[in-house]
Image: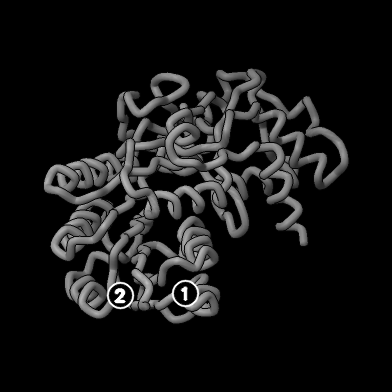
Amino acid sequence: MDKDVVLITGATGFIGSHVAREIVRIGKYKVVAIVRETENYKNTDELSREEVSLIKGLFYDGQVLDTVFREHKVKYVIHLAALRGAGKQGSYGEVNVKGTEKLLESSLRNKIKRFVFCSSVGVFGTIPSELPATTATRLNGDNKYHKSKILAEAKVREFIEKGLDACIVRPAITYGEGDDGFSATLISLVKTGLLLLPKKQNRVHLLDVHSLAVLFNNLINEEKLQVRIMTMADESPIRLRDLVNLINRFYFGKNYPDYYTISPHLFRALYVIFRLTGCEQWATRIQLISKDWYYDVGTIRSLTGVQCANTEQSFLRYLKNAAV
């Protein structure tokens, strides 16, 4: 008997490659991935070795979608692809919002069993207005990417009302093999001794990418969803200083020097400077380093059967694997 098909967008990305590998590892479904028409695009060789069927094109191209749904028995869609920075592939509105809408339309028209949308805790803003942030916390689109995720979530909710079986996952900042984002930058700054820490012992809330991949696999296997919107992160936040010490001990056998600290006033000044000079990425990093941000993951633990990771244990494993 032919296997049902899971269509994944964004499978070549950091999160997407882990999700694709997890579903292939379980072996219940065939995986089809829409990938950009770029020669030697990242992770495509690995996905091919995993016997993922690669369809070249853009996930928001109507002709590509018609071909995929016509030629494959797509029963589940995991939508991970999104524009994060300015580029040639289109605007935030075109890709993240209208593109998501086109994929939703195709999914509803072809009567798939479930649509899983990967949003972001960024819908709460870089720093949530309340801690821990819950699904009831006020949404705050404080940059173009976060705004686009809020609008895309609204599209998913519209299609749920139309009868599409869909859910929304809001992952925290992820770490793991292949990471080139916040956690990789943090490690680099610690190793070079360039990280400045706040005097306050602030807490951050990360997410082991493997746990997230398990969650996506579980969600396409759940017969009946008990919740439609959920936030995913590790089991509890961690003090940034503890995480930095963990990294420094791994590489140098001792804690990070205490004298690399600055006052909140200096962090605020740096934030303003980066904003005024258009360095949005570094303005965001200043906020993430200097303030508290964490989330309520009680729903995940009680309803999805996913074991949230212990950050210290999982991050140390990540460091060891990266060093091999």
Q: Which SS class for mark 2?
A: loop
Three-letter amino acid code at the position of disc 1: Tyr
Vertical relation: 167 (above or below) 294: below
Disc 1: CA contacts within 10 A as few (<14), some (14-19) or many (>=20): few
Quarter that holds the N terminus: bottom left
Lateral position of residue 191 relative to residue 151, left or right: right
Along the horizontal axis of the image, is 251 left or right of 239? right
Foreground residue among 224 and 74: 224
**Residue farthest toward the front in the current orientation of the protein:** 1
Residue 318 screen position, x and y as percent? 68, 51
Position of 260 relative to 152 (above/below)? above
Which residue is pictured at 22% across the width and 71% down the height?
Answer: 65
Near-viewer residue (298 or 138): 298
Position of residue 207 relative to residue 179, above or below, is above
Colouring scheme, one of rainbow, by chain, secondary structure, one colour: one colour
Give residue 57's mark: 2
Front residue of this view, candidates 201 and 163: 163
* Image quarter of residue 130: top left
Q: Are marks 2 and 1 in contact (CB under 8 Å)?
A: no
User: Residue 322 lies in what quarter of the image?
Assistant: bottom right
Residue 280 is situated, as x and y percent measured from the top left of the image, at: 43, 41
Q: Which residue does the numbered mark 1 point to in the structure image?
A: 41
Q: Amino acid at mark 2?
A: Gly
Residue visible at 62% across and 19% down in the picture? 263
Measured along the vertical axis of the image, is residue 30 above or below residue 282? below
Quarter of the C terminus within the rendering? bottom right
For the residues labelled 2 and 1, the Cα–Cα distance comes to 12 Å
Q: Earlier in the sequence, mark 2 or mark 1?
A: 1
